[in-house]
């Protein structure tokens, strides 16, 4: 009985240490240039700012993830990405679940302020997020997603609101947002 | 009882400082956390 109690106490101490370390590491990442793997990061600072014509985004299907930063709040996260018909899409799942609503705050924030900066292979692109709720592109997109990632989401999941899909579209006034990041 | 809270505070502060200062600790912690999240989500 004494041994069990001692093991329990040691376990609680280890849990305290690990929890503190996780919170500290997550907080520290907020001051870094971009996200790490799981924890959100600060604004995307480094990298050339792309100013050319809208590219064919098909190449992102060969890219594992991209870094996405909202302007408000100026935090970044690493997310999955896919392209269909030359356009780039990002998405967020589990949006109808309690855990998803707690964990995934960026989609709702993106609806309030759609301006984003994405960084792919070290190049930053100023864009905006346009939510796609219906349409034939969803099934095609989800087919690409299922091939690229271990995901079983479908167009029906998007239409039910469980998956929020955004097109990463050109910004009409992209130049005006540069100063907002500072 | 007060002694316990002091100990908890010391452990929290020491852990936070070590995680913040020592290079690579935050990355290692994130790796463990990522594995736990992956296990929990499957």
Image: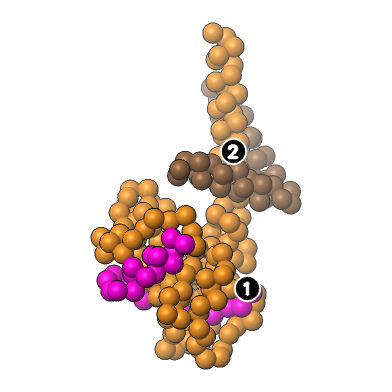
In the image, which disc is placed on residue A9?
none
Q: State the image coordinates of residue A126 (x, y, percent, origin top left).
A: 51, 81
The C terminus of chain A lies in quadrant: bottom right
Q: Is residue A124 magenta?
A: yes
Query: Residue at image x 60%, y 49%?
Result: B30
Residue neighbourhood size for the residue with mark 1, other residues' Cα within 10 Å, grouped as few (<14), some (14–19), many (≥20): few
- Residue at 31%, 64% (x, y): give it: A155
Q: Which chain is brown?
A: B
- Residue A46 location (% of width, % of height): 65, 74
Where does the image place residue A110, in percent across and percent down from the top left?
Answer: 39, 70
Magenta region, residue range: A122-147
Look at the numbered disc 1 and give the secondary structure of its residue: loop
Q: Position of residue A152 (x, y in %)?
A: 39, 55
Q: Is residue A5 above or below residue A147?
A: above
On the image, numbered disc 2 is attached to which residue?
A: A18
Chain A, chosen colour in render? orange
Q: Residues within 10 Å of mark 2 (few under 14, many from 20)?
A: some
Q: Report the residue marked by disc 1.
A: A121
Q: Is residue B19 in view from this perspective?
A: yes
Element under disc 2: helix
Residue A51 is left or right of residue A89, and the answer is right
């Amino acid at each position: 009985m004494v041994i069990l109690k001692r093991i329990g106490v040691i376990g609680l101490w280890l849990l305290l240490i690990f929890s503190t370390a996780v919170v500290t590491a997550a907080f520290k990442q907020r001051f870094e240039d971009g996200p790490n793997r799981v924890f959100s990061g600060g604004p995307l600072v480094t990298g050339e700012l792309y100013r050319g014509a809208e590219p064919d985004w098909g190449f992102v299907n060969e890219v594992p993830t991209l870094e996405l930063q909202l302007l408000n709040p100026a935090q970044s996260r690493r997310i999955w990405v896919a392209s269909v018909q030359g356009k780039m899409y990002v998405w967020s799942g589990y949006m109808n679940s309690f855990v998803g609503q707690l964990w995934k705050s960026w989609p709702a924030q993106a609806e309030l302020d759609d301006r984003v900066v994405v960084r792919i292979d070290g190049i930053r692109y100023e864009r905006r997020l346009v939510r796609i709720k219906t349409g034939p592109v969803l099934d095609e997109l989800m087919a690409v997603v299922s091939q690229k990632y271990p995901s079983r989401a479908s167009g029906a999941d998007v239409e039910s609101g469980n998956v929020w899909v955004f097109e990463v579209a050109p910004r009409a006034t992209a130049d005006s947002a540069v100063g907002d990041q500072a | 009882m007060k002694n316990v809270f002091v100990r908890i505070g010391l452990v929290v502060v020491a852990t936070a400082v070590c995680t913040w200062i020592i290079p690579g600790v935050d990355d290692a912690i994130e790796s463990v956390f990522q594995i736990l999240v992956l296990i929990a989500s499957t």
